[in-house]
Image (cartoon, helix red, strand yellow):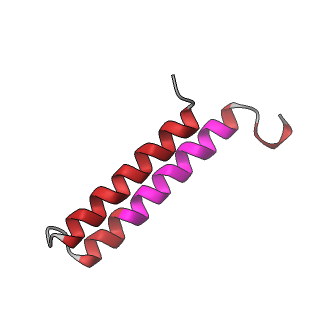
Amino acid sequence: MPSPGLLLTIGATSAFLALCLALGLGLLAPKRFAQSVAGGACGIALVVAGSWMMEGGAHG
């Protein structure tokens, strides 16, 4: 089983590429694309921060 970090990277990359494809095909407006990317980045940041805190944070 791949590590959670690798799975997060693969999932985030595939979601971003799907958004780029939708934008390129005209299925997504540029404003909605920007909102989706920003929301995804916030979600990834929350997941990473949460997992970091569960592991003990900066104090290990």
Residue 4, quarter of picture: top right
Number of on-image labels: 0
Residue occupying image coordinates x 40% and y 60%? 39
Residue occupying image coordinates x 14% and y 73%? 26
Membership of 17 in magenta stretch: no
Residue extending farthest right: 59
Indicate whether 20 appears above or below 7.
below
- Describe residue 11's horizontal placement relative to residue 24 as left or right: right
Residue 58 in the image: state x and y as whole percent. Answer: 81, 43
Tell me where the magenta segment starts and ends, as one range.
37-52
Indicate whether 53 appears above or below 22.
above
Residue 27 in the image: state x and y as whole percent. Answer: 14, 67
- Describe residue 51's horizontal placement relative to residue 28 as left or right: right
Using the image as rendered, state which of residue 22 and residue 51 is in the foreground: 22
Q: Quadrant of the C terminus?
A: top right
Residue 20, quarter of picture: bottom left
Residue 51 in the image: state x and y as whole percent. Answer: 62, 36
Residue occupying image coordinates x 34% and y 52%? 15
Indicate whether 58 appears above or below 16.
above
- Describe residue 26's horizontal placement relative to residue 20 as left or right: left
Using the image as rendered, state which of residue 6 and residue 43 is in the foreground: 6
- Describe residue 33's horizontal placement relative to residue 10 as left or right: left
Membership of 41 in magenta stretch: yes
Magenta span dominant secondary structure: helix
Residue 30 in the image: state x and y as whole percent. Answer: 26, 77
Residue extending farthest top: 1
